[in-house]
Amino acid sequence: MIEFTKMHGLGNDFVVIDAINQSISLQAEQIRTWSNRHFGIGFDQLLLVEIPVSPDADFKYRIFNADGSEVAQCGNGARCFAKFVRDKNLTDKDEIRVDTNAGQLLLKLNADGMITVNMGIPKHKPEEIPLKTQDEAKFYSVIANNIERGFGAVSLGNPHAVLQVHDIKHAPVNELGPLLESHPDFPERANIGFMQVIDRGHIKLRVYERGAAETLACGSGACAAAIIGIEQNLLDHEVIVELPGGTLTINWPGRGQPVLMTGPAVSVFEGRILL
């Protein structure tokens, strides 16, 4: 029997498991079953709290998509991770350093209940994203459905492509999302963002997440959209990102600097499930 907590960050929902005080070994098929909203618990990602790898870290943070694949980054999940370890008395710190498969994250619990995640320094080189092209650029293009589509790309420990659209309500998320997510130009697949610029400090965003389809919110996707908008001189350095599930604030000074994401995290219920 495994104890878990159901949580969400702006409707991007998670099952969070303490894998320090419980012995757990998960298989991809098991995760797929649990993630099913009709036959399981239902979630976008499963998060594990583990003992740290680095001597200066407090925990290790692991993320599994609903399809059972393990990924290196999830910003909304990171905020839920921070709330979980405090709520479960696993730490009394207001600043928590966690190991991930993409490096370390610094999580800060603010006095107003919001949580700020230092998502690290974005990576722009094509081989770091990864993206199959030789030269780094602020604008790339890809052929999908016989139409050339322009996009920006960046890595935050996971690959993101962001397309600008005129009207977020009618963005072709369900049509283009799966085509671009698994496009050959993205050898590790990609998260696909659809961004409507409202003004230089405000965007609307929908994200088709790698391995999870469209979600109500994507923290790293919000960071990626802000970064790409700033790089393309569409946005200022502090951006309000309005997602279907709610709003995040993204701060990014520019190249070589870490990106900061601030938003809420909510616990929904506690449960136990048989392995």
Image (cartoon, rainbow, N blue to C red):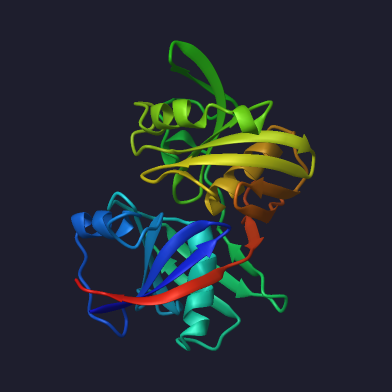
Residue name at image x 40 percent, y 33 percent: 181
In the picture shown, does residue 60 fall above or below 178? below
Picture quarter containing residue 263? bottom right
Left or right, 229 with reference to 160 = right
Where residue 34 sits in the image (x, y, percent)? Answer: 28, 60
Q: Closest to the observer: 48 or 247?
A: 247
Location of residue 47 (image quadrant):
bottom left
When the figure is inspected, residue 20 is found, relative to residue 153, above or below; the finding is below
Q: Residue at x 52, y 74 (%)?
A: 82
The quarter of the rendered structure image containing the C terminus is: bottom left
Q: At 63% across and 55% down in the image, what residue appears?
A: 259
Question: Quadrant of residue 50 in the image?
Answer: bottom left
Q: Residue furthest front?
A: 38
Q: Front-most of 145 and 230? A: 145
> Camera-side residue: 119 or 81?
81
Return the x and y of residue 171 as percentages of the image width and height: 58, 28
Rendered residue at 53%/26% (across/down): 172
x, y percent for residue 42: 37, 58
Image quadrant containing the N terminus:
bottom left
x and y percentages locating residue 209 in the rendered image:
45, 43
Give the farthest residue toward the top.
146
The count of marks equals 0
